[in-house]
Amino acid sequence: MPFTLLAHGETRISSVLAGVFNATTPLTTLVFVLLIVPQERITRARLSGLLVGFTGVLVVLGAWRGLAGSLLEGSLACLAATACYGAGFAYTRRFFSGGDHSASALSAAQITCATVQLAVVAWPLGGLPSWPGTSAAVALVVLGAAGTGLAYVLNLDVIRAAGPTVASTVTYVTPLWSTAVGALLLGEPVGWNTLVGGAVVIGGVLLARSRTNVKISA
């Protein structure tokens, strides 16, 4: 679901903006961790971090200008994708990371199930696939093998070692690359609100992960 949502979102908004939205993944991870991982508790710092992060999203969107049409549709698709990532991190922490199965086996099972699901729904919704060209096909293979296959194995290892919230902070790097590559290679504009909003989102995540949290609920 998140891959499909991101692909759809980037047909409506720039890769720079999509990359910044990806930085909200630790915030959505925190929400789902608090909901389904019993060991986690809501604290003032975490609640404040969520509110600060949400404010950052509004700044990125330029909410004061109003949202409509393709910008809103693409933005919501990308935010829905990060919500899927957050749910996945938390679910993996509670139900998968404590087992004795290898990270490679669990990742292979997850990706295989996703492939079967896409094979069932993709052609009725989007038609049969066609040859995208040699360069695009090579890019898909590299992204699938490294950006998905190897990354899933490493991701599960990090969740086991440091927890889902820490693992999700890898998305901090995404806005840096998407902004740089989008601006340099695609000529995409980078507004002040994109940079400021991205910084606010990251600040919210850091606040939410503060170790000096005070519990406000049991």
Image (cartoon, grey):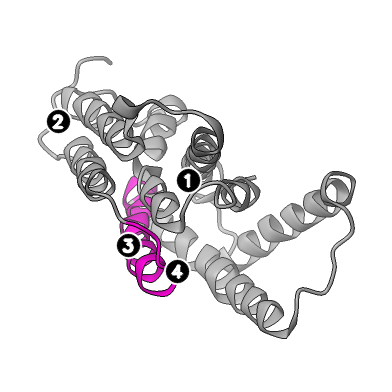
Tell me the tag on residue 173. 3
Local secondary structure at mark 2: loop
**Would residue 36 be counted in the magenta stretch?**
no
* Quadrant occupied by the C terminus: top left
Q: Are marks 4 and 3 in contact (CB under 8 Å)?
A: no
Q: Position of residue 182 (x, y in %)?
A: 41, 65
Q: Earlier in the sequence, mark 3 or mark 2?
A: 3
Point 84% across, 45% down: residue: 121
Residue pointed to by mark 4: 186
Local secondary structure at mark 4: loop
Where 165 falls versus 28 (above or below)? below
Q: Nearer the viewer, residue 121 or 155?
A: 121
Q: Earlier in the sequence, mark 3 or mark 1?
A: 1
Q: Earlier in the sequence, mark 4 or mark 1?
A: 1
**Which numbered mark, 4 or 1, is in the foreground of this view?**
4
Residue pointed to by mark 1: 89
Q: Which residues are magenta?
A: 163-189
**Would residue 182 be counted in the magenta stretch?**
yes
Callout 4 crowding tier (Cα within 10 Å): few <14, some 14–19, many ≥20: few
**Residue 203 shown left or right of residue 169 in the figure:** left
Q: Earlier in the sequence, mark 1 or mark 2?
A: 1
Mark 1 residue type:
Phe
Q: For marks 2 and 4, give the CA distance.
A: 42 Å
Q: Nearer the viewer, residue 12 or 111?
A: 12
**Which numbered mark, 3 or 1, is in the foreground of this view?**
3
Local secondary structure at mark 3: helix
Where 23 falls versus 102 (above or below)? above
Q: For marks 4 and 1, give the CA distance.
A: 31 Å
Q: For marks 3 and 2, give the CA distance.
A: 25 Å
